Image (cartoon, rainbow, N blue to C red):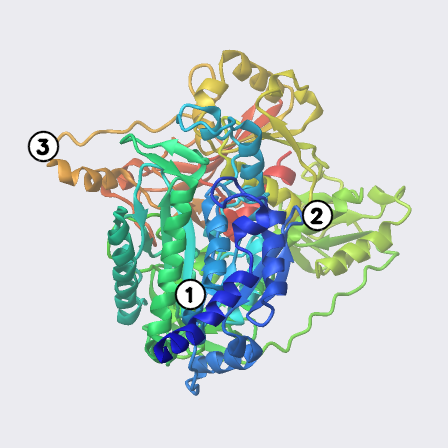
Amino acid sequence: MKKFAVLLAFLLPLMTWSQSIKSPSEFLGYEIGTQFTRHHEVVDYYQYLASAASDRVQLQMYGKTNERRPLLLAYVSSAENIANLEAIRTAHLKSTEGISNASKAIVWLSYNVHGNESVSTEASMQTIYELLTSKQAYLENTVVIMDPCINPDGRDRYVNWYNQYKNTPNQINPDSKEHHEGWLSGRANHYMFDLNRDWAWLTQVESQQRLPMYNQWLPHIHVDFHEQGLNNPYFFAPSAEPFHEVITPFQRSFQETLGRNHAKYFDANGWFYFTKERFDLFYPSYGDTYPTYNGAIGMTYEQGGSGRAGLGVITGIGDTLSLKDRLDHHRTTGLSTIEVASQNVDRLNQEFQKFYQPKNYKYKSYVLNGDIDKQRALTSLLEKHEIEYGWGKKGVAKGFNYTAGTNGTIQTSENSLIISTNQKKGTLVKVLFEPDAKLSDSLTYDITAWSLPYAYGLDALASNNVVQAVPDSKKQAIPMAAADSYAFITDWNSMNDARFLADLLVHKIRVRRAEKPFTSEGRNHKRGSLIITASDNKNHSAFISTLRSVAEKYSKSLAPTATGFVDKGKDFGSSYVGVVKPVKVAVLSGEPTSTLRFGEIWHFFEQQLHYPITVLDADYIERTDLSEYDILILPDGRGYRSFMDKTMLESVKDWVSAGGRLIAMGNAIDAIEGKEGFGIKPKERKRDSTNLEVDPYENEQRERMKQAITGAIFKTRVDPTHPLAFGYGDTYFTLKLGNDSFEYLESGTVAYIENNTKPVAGFAGSEAQKTIATSMVFGVENYRRGQVIYMVDNPLFRGFWENGKLFFANALFMIN
């Protein structure tokens, strides 16, 4: 009887909590896993839990999406821990300073970064419910932070589409419409960006709002829940090679610890899984790698299913995969992760503190000289990551010179940006800035190069020594535009300059651009310099006030001049000083374009350049009067061969002949070249006839890698006299994503690869390097009254290749 009383005393609290908190099924009114839950209903359930279990759940809205859906974090722990949550957070962060006695594990679970990988949000609701009921013991020494849906816009797009097209009851036949999303799938966010590639680059509002919250906690463990192809079994840690060299032995071994615990549950249920394949830890902008480079055990968990699975589908081996199955798997690994964390609190805290101890990395400091606008763009990113930086003193630094590709020196001054690895975020600094990340295996899941000095177009040096730096104390005073000036001159070097120009054009201010360098009143000005004259804008009633306002907005210094008669070069009335046309721009969407590549262009115009663009869908573009548009952009995509039939090609050619400007990117170029198209010609690919050996089947994948370029950086030559290259020097570092290659144009080759095809960073196969020798990267073909601009490489890739964006702005505004 006494034993029964003790048992009853133990069970009674659990029974009470279980009875007082509704399960997701009880709250939603349907069994979880039998329907998809819309985002507002998910929010309702989390708000309900924050009210019903307010002593153990705190809910925080940390932002909104582009479509105004709320972004949430739920903090879940014991009542005592929630009451002391801020003290726990503070003690944990002191571990980064080496002075903490933290005694709790911090686990962060992120769900549904890809909207059509839709099961994880459902799993999050069941997971938090079980944490508050049957798994309360895990929370005694663990704080769990849950983001139930990183990408609500994409997820609701998928859920709403599925609910519109599914059969009733749902159809498990994979041929059914409900298993085939259209072009505008739910995977990406509003702007068609992949949020799981944006952790480091922070181009999207979801990432920008989430990262400050993440940095407030820097958890011990971070899990990113995903789905993969429906015929794949479940993937969990350990991850595959390549691992970045900064990943610690503990981070590797603890993935094994977690994986074995997951396997125990999966084995008990007869569920299939795999580990150590496909999903590596290298590219820094994933939801597993970015946390890893900030001290966490960062992991991806991948359930088979994705947008093909719906509520249920027959797999390739004839089994039926249901939403309930998928939910159970994610729920199991989520709870298993928290269980292991609760059993290893001391070790997690010790190793986390060890991660933040000073490191003896090869390069101690990175020195970056160059355009102040590009430096500002980079420091803005650094501040978001809480990376410290400073400014140099007059002197010389020695080390690896990025531009030369060899050891050398660089002059330092008060205008030199200095970033050191001797700081809390030193490991992240190394990963983002090192010239060429060490690659242990060429079979990777993503790009293999991203070094920020190349991406931002700055003259950089990686020093083996600490370069002294001081905080930024410079405050640039912007002189006010004088009302009585004949004209105002400003430079053209960066995206900030492009935004300035775009804003003036939107405000109907007329601007000219110089095609030749010139000297005015003793000041030298480069090609592309912007000239705003009073006489051009005499009918603009608010010319000076608008110009002052826009210049202040973009911190633009305007050099006044009293005359259009230059000391050297072309006068302001010359044909070489043309008016920048406020172009009307259209972009093709839908099949045959890639949603991601279309999204990069859409986002570039609306959120970066702030210039209007019209989206034309492939379904009706043949009925559109293209003469209404000055520029048509064809984003990269895989379906152009069928889209660009003879009739469509002739229509485009007629439009260009009449003065239109076509910007063709990536695979769109293939559809417009040839006898019936424009003048661009693909390079002939020669097969290696010397190697006649038959390779074993198991070597096929690695043999194919000889033809591959997995996101590598190449040094190109540039013709800086061409308007497409205004603002650039004679060198540009391009991020190449494949081995497509085209001959130099007869005239108008602007950026190109010469015979040296070894990448400065990243992986490129031996045969691929041969293929791209003496090939064009960017070029302009004059075609009767119009132009075709070819962009073989993507200057807008994922929105982070900052130094490529001016090429795109030049294509819009600098070409006459």
Q: CA distance from mark 2 to mark 3?
A: 58 Å
Does 188 appear above or below 168? below
Front residue of this view, candidates 152 and 813: 152
Q: Are marks 1 and 3 in contact (CB under 8 Å)?
A: no
Marked residue nearer the N-terminal end (1 or 3): 1
Residue carrying label 3: 694
Residue drawn 77% across and 65% down? 479
Does 14 appear above or below 599? below
Marked residue nearer the N-terminal end (2 or 3): 2
**Which label was assigned to residue 135?**
1
Q: CA distance from mark 1 to mark 3?
A: 56 Å
Q: Quadrant of the C terminus?
A: top right
- How many other residues sit within 10 Å of disc 1, few (<14), some (14-19) or many (≥20)? some
Marked residue nearer the N-terminal end (1 or 2): 1
Image location of residue 389, percent across then percent down: 52, 74
Residue 507 falls left or right of residue 393: right
Residue drawn 58% across and 47% down? 28
In front: label 2 or label 3: 3
Residue type for callout 1: Lys
Residue drawn 29% across and 40% down? 708
Image location of residue 421, percent across then percent down: 41, 74
Q: Are marks 1 and 2 in contact (CB under 8 Å)?
A: no
- Is residue 276 visible in the rendered structure shown here? no
> SS for tag 3?
loop
